[in-house]
Amino acid sequence: MEILLYAGGILFMLIGLGLSIGLHEIGHLLPAKLFGVRVGQYMIGFGPRIWSRRIGETEYGVKLLPVGGFISMSGMYPASRSARPVGGLFRSLVQDARTANDETIAEGEEHRVFYRLPVWKRVIVMFGGPLMNLLLALLIFTVLASGIGLQQGTTTVASVTQCVVPAGTTQEACSADDPASPAVEAGIRPGDVLISIDGTPVSTFAEATEIVQAAPGRPLDLVVRRDDEDVALTITPIAAERELTDAAGRPVLDDDGEPVVREVGYVGMASQMGFVPQPLIVGPEMAAENVGRVASLIATLPVRLWEVGASLVTGTERDPNGPLSVVGVGRIAGEVAATEAPVLNRFAVLLNLLGSLNIALFVFNLIPLLPLDGGHIVVALWEGVKRGWARLFRRPPPAPVDATRLVPLTVVVAVLLIGMGALLLVADVFNPVDLLQ
């Protein structure tokens, strides 16, 4: 059964990845067709073709390796006759790129080429792919946060501490000299549901904790629901040094990564954890937080890749916040699905993983280097700058930017991307990230 669950987690992520790639390419396809560009192919994956079908002028298909996708647009670059000759060692690469580009321009369809579009239309076509990943991530995080809910303390009391012990102590049992906790003195029992504290209705344990922590030494009116009846109690928090926690019960850390300890009101009760639906704004906030995290990772990518390589050679533990390959993501998905956690908990983790994957696709594809979408956007914007400069000084319109001249740089970037993928793939097989430790 565990093997089936593991395989199910991998299958879930493969389907999610295929959907993400497919939507990314649709983000390019729809505006390209809307603007009249001839699109010869729409493919999900690379390598040998598994299935394809031609509808109109476009061939739609799926290839074996689900590590990306592409659409083939007519005339991504100016035709060879309008390009200036290029010398140097990379001339053959440039010429091959121009020949391949010329072959996409059908006879009689020269007006339906990508490079003739206005700059703003080219930007929309190239930005459409990453945008689809961002929108899918927003949808996933919104469903996760507001539909399923985020795990945090509910208003149901899970346990009551019998006595008060100093913060940071290793003492596990109460002694005769330890004072009873305020919760015990107030008569709170496990299973009670908090209704209101100090006259304020509470819907999460975090709200109750905030009121308690702000009122050390002050008696508070407390209403709990017990056996379908509302019971009125009075509880007096004591002043105690305690580690601060967030809404999910996790310790709040300072800039040095140490738990924040403050003197706050304390009563000695813990809540049951559960999925609590959040306001709709939380989904976009989660997406924005993920964008910042991925952007930070990409900004330090050379260092992160060096650390991955070092951990692969030495066998040391990898950074759980470091980069992963498709194999690594699938492996984590399988491990999550095979755990003994409740089904809803596992599904929520898988959704969060898929949402984060789409954020990674969004940010990574906007890197301003060819052959990534961000590189094509930069080329279009540069042409817009040249045209604007010419209009400003009343000069003739400049020739279209010949991006094939950047093919040598594109090849270097492609080789680096392949090398990065190979390194992460090997690391994820022989020294995988352990998120479930």
Image: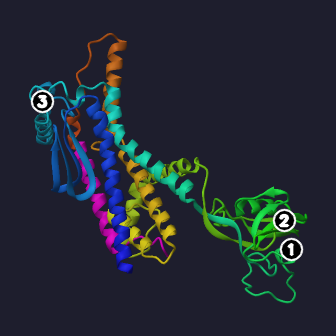
Q: Which residue is mark 1?
A: 186
Is residue 366 among what the camera can see?
A: no
Instruction: Look at mark 2 in the image and give the residue it sits on.
Output: 222
Q: Give the residue drawn at x 48%, y 73%.
A: 436
Q: State yes or no: discs 1 and 2 in contact (Cβ < 8 Å).
A: yes
Determine the secondary structure under disc 3: helix
Foreground label between 3 and 2: 2
Please tell me which residue is depicted at 35% across the width and 79% down the height of the picture. 3
The Cα–Cα distance between marks 3 and 1, rounded to whole angstroms, is: 85 Å
Type of amino acid at the residue the image marks with label 2: Leu
- Mark seen at residue 80: 3
Asked if the residue under mark 2 is in contact with the one under mark 3, i.e. CB atoms within 8 Å, the reply is: no
Along the horizontal axis of the image, is 58 left or right of 127? left
The residue segment tinted magenta is 409-437
Quarter of the image where one finds residue 373: top left
Instruction: Indicate which disc, 3 or 1, sits on the residue closer to the N terminus.
Output: 3
Residue 267 percent location from the top left of the image:
81, 71
User: Overall secondary structure of the magenta stretch?
Assistant: helix
- Can you say which quadrant of the picture contains the N terminus? bottom left
Q: Alpha carbon of mark 1 to alpha carbon of mark 2: how far?
A: 9 Å
Closest to the camera, between mark 3 and mark 1, is 1
Assign a secondary structure to mark 2.
strand
Task: Give me the C-alpha separation between circle 3 and circle 2.
Answer: 80 Å
